[in-house]
Amino acid sequence: MGGKRQITEEQRREARLIWDYARMGHTLVPADVAIGLGSHDLGVATASAGLFHAGLFPTVVFTGGNSPTTRARFPRGEAVHYREHALGLGVPDAAILVEPNAANTGQNITLSRDLLAAAGIVPRTVLLVSKPYMERRSYATARKLWPEVEVLCASEPLDLEAYVKSIGDEKLVLDMLVGDFQRVVEYPKHGFAIAQDVPGIVHAAFERLVRQGFTSRLVS
């Protein structure tokens, strides 16, 4: 197993609390556009393609440049690779816009909004497609930066165990969960996102995982 850290069942239980909190549980209805948020996870493009074929939107923006965690996997940029993957899944080229510069979630939102406006599209409803554990943070960011649109969130319909299997590194997934939750809590203080209620049991799970060393994705 290459020396990968063994995760205990108690740590998995804590992670599931954060995972479940991160999912928005929105009932999906047709939207004017979708935005596929760039990351290391090609499943975002897979989910976007499936939702397009289900008739939930006519146009999707794939947004994202590169980060240290995606440069090797997506050397031409996250959005470019997402587009290629979606084309391979039957999404027509005319339905895809590419925003290749965003370096964070706030830029994903604002640069996609600007790209859509330049294309003459001013949506009233936006479907954000993200990694499963990023739904709540992407929602909070969009509500802060683009308050005039109605926002729905979607991701691949995976539970935590299935997602870990798709990524192949349980420790990394727990680190990412912990880091994303921290941003949900901290970013509103800096004006990056709206504040949201956090159940005490979820915050306690986060604090226990931090004490146990799942800290590689925390921001200082």
Image (tube, rainbow, N blue to C red):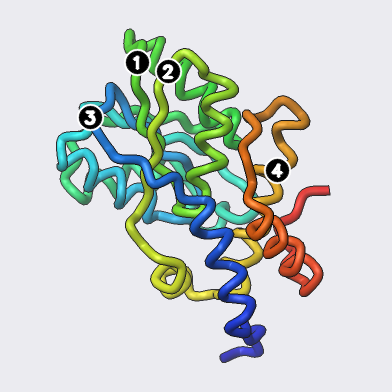
Asked whether the beta carbons under mark 2 and mark 3 sit within 8 Å of each other, the answer is no
Task: Check disc 2: other Cα within 10 Å, few if <14, some if 14-19, many if 20+.
Answer: some
Mark 1 or mark 4, which is nearer the start of the sequence? 1
What amino acid type is highlighted by mark number 2? Val
Circle 4/circle 3 CB separation < 8 Å = no
Image quarter where the N terminus lies is bottom right
Pointer 1: residues within 10 angstroms few (<14), some, or many (20+)? some
Amino acid beneath label 1: Pro
Local SS, label 4: helix
In 3D space, how far apart are the residues under numbered discs 2 and 1 (Cα atoms)?
Answer: 7 Å
Q: Nearer the viewer, residue 73 or 175?
A: 175
What's the distance in space between the residues labelled 4 and 1, CA to CA? 28 Å
In the image shown, does 32 or 112 lie closer to the viewer?
A: 32
Q: Which residue is mark 2?
A: 149
Which of the two labelled residues, at mark 2 and mark 1, occupies the earlier sequence position?
Answer: 1
Q: Give the SS element for disc 2.
A: loop
* Disc nearest the viewer among 4 and 1: 4
The amino acid type found where label 4 is placed reads: Val
Q: Which residue in the protein does label 3 denote? A: 30
Q: Earlier in the sequence, mark 1 or mark 3?
A: 3
In this rendering, the label closer to the viewer, 2 or 1: 2
Residue 88: % across, % down: 22, 50
Give the class, few, some or many, for how many residues have Cα within 10 Å of label 4's Cα (few <14, many ≥20): some
